[in-house]
Image (cartoon, rainbow, N blue to C red):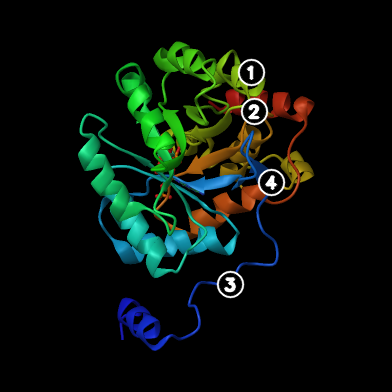
């Protein structure tokens, strides 16, 4: 019997939850400033499994997230509905779903939220691409006031948007900023991340592996022995632990369709993080390989 058929039968028969057990050791979480909401430090990005519409493969990576006590899934387009269905089949009732909408059609957005919303009828995080905030930010604020979403955020991954992001943070209306940051793309640390700290805005980091290009730099190279001093077991964790040790960062989004990679990434949320001196050493070491 297919797992999906079993889940349906189990639901109909009122059997005990099939949700995977949470491991004894769960990843760290940080509070979204100004709220009591706890955001686990490793989130899932918009996986190819979601984009392909492959619910079974999506369940496999989401299951790993749940086992490690993770909660956040970032997704857009039709992938939103695939990720939401996979989470629902896993009876993942604690999920924090962050999604993007075409804000030029508010009625369509309301219909889509109705398909995606949790038990209280609202989205967790409604995202607006930063190039659209001038046009659509008032609409986003209206959706939040109407209870359609708990949080509103903006997201992009290139420095041309940093001035707009900084301006929006200073309005006091932005709950969550999503921006690129890593050892090979460090520019957000100059002005964007300090502003987020000053203004009390939660920060999610995208492109921790520069969409895979990072692995081209480290492939075939030995992880330095001193990485064990901050409980780092792999090159993926080397990047993720660097990002998570920045004080402005709430959470980092990792994209994968491979459950083993998901476990590797989630384990970066366990154990120690590097201090400032070690961060400098990490950056120098990586640049020497690049
Ligand atoms: N709003 C925006 O403007 C924006 C822009 C960029 C990104 N984002 C968000 O940020 C997320 C992450 O950024 P990204 O798309 O640049 O992806 P990324 O997480 O930087 O890199 C993903 C790539 O790394 C590989 N990978 C992941 N974990 C691995 C591991 N442990 N070992 C080896 N390879 C691994 C993946 O391949 P496998 O599938 O084979 O693991 C994939 O090729 C996106 O999914 C999206 O949600 C948002």
281, above or below 150, in the image: above
Q: Residues within 10 Å of mark 4 (few under 14, many from 20)?
A: many
User: Of the residues tagged 1 and 4, which is closer to the observer?
Assistant: 1
- Residue 10 lies, in percent from the top left, at 39, 84
Residue closer to the observer: 26 or 133: 133
Cα–Cα span, label 1 and label 2: 7 Å
Residue 21: numbered disc: 3
Residue at screen point 65% across, 44% down? 36
Q: Is tag 1's residue or tag 4's residue first in the polypeptide sequence?
A: 1
Residue ID at (42%, 25%): 157
Work out whether mark 3 precedes mark 2 in sequence or the reverse, and give the earlier one: 3
The residue at the far front in this view is 146
The numbered mark at residue 248 is 2
**Residue that label 1 marks:** 194
The answer for how far apart the CA atoms under marks 1 and 4 are is: 26 Å
**Mark 2 Cα within 10 Å, few/some/many (few <14, many 20+)?**
many
Measured as percent of width and height from the top left, residue 28 is found at 68, 49
Secondary structure under the numbered disc 1 in the rendered image: helix
Distance CA(mark 4)–CA(mark 3): 25 Å
Q: Which mark is residue 264?
A: none
């Amino acid at each position: 019997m297919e797992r999906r058929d079993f889940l349906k039968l189990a639901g109909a028969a009122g059997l005990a939850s099939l949700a995977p057990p949470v491991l004894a050791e769960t990843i760290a979480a940080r509070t979204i400033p100004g709220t009591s909401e706890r955001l686990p430090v490793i989130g899932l990005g918009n996986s190819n499994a979601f984009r392909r519409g492959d619910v079974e493969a999506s369940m496999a990576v989401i299951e790993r997230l749940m086992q490690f006590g993770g909660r956040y899934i970032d997704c857009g387009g039709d992938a939103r509905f695939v990720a939401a269905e996979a989470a629902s089949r896993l009876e993942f009732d604690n999920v924090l779903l962050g999604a993007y909408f075409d804000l030029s059609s508010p009625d369509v957005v309301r219909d889509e939220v109705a398909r995606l919303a949790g038990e209280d009828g609202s989205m967790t995080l409604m995202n607006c691409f930063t190039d659209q905030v001038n046009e659509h930010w008032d609409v986003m604020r209206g959706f939040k006031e109407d209870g359609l979403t708990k949080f509103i955020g903006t997201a992009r991954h290139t420095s041309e948007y940093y001035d707009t992001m900084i301006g929006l943070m200073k309005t006091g209306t932005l709950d969550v900023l999503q921006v690129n940051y890593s050892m090979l793309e460090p520019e957000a640390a100059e002005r964007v991340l300090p502003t987020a700290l000053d203004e009390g805005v939660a920060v999610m980091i995208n492109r921790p592996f520069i969409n895979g290009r990072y692995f081209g730099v480290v492939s075939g190279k030995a992880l330095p022995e001193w990485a064990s001093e901050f409980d780092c077991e792999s090159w993926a964790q080397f990047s993720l632990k660097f990002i998570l040790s920045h004080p402005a960062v709430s959470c980092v989004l990792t994209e994968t369709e491979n459950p083993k990679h998901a476990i590797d990434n989630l384990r970066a949320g366990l154990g120690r993080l590097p201090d400032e001196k070690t961060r400098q050493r990490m950056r120098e070491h990586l640049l020497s390989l690049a």
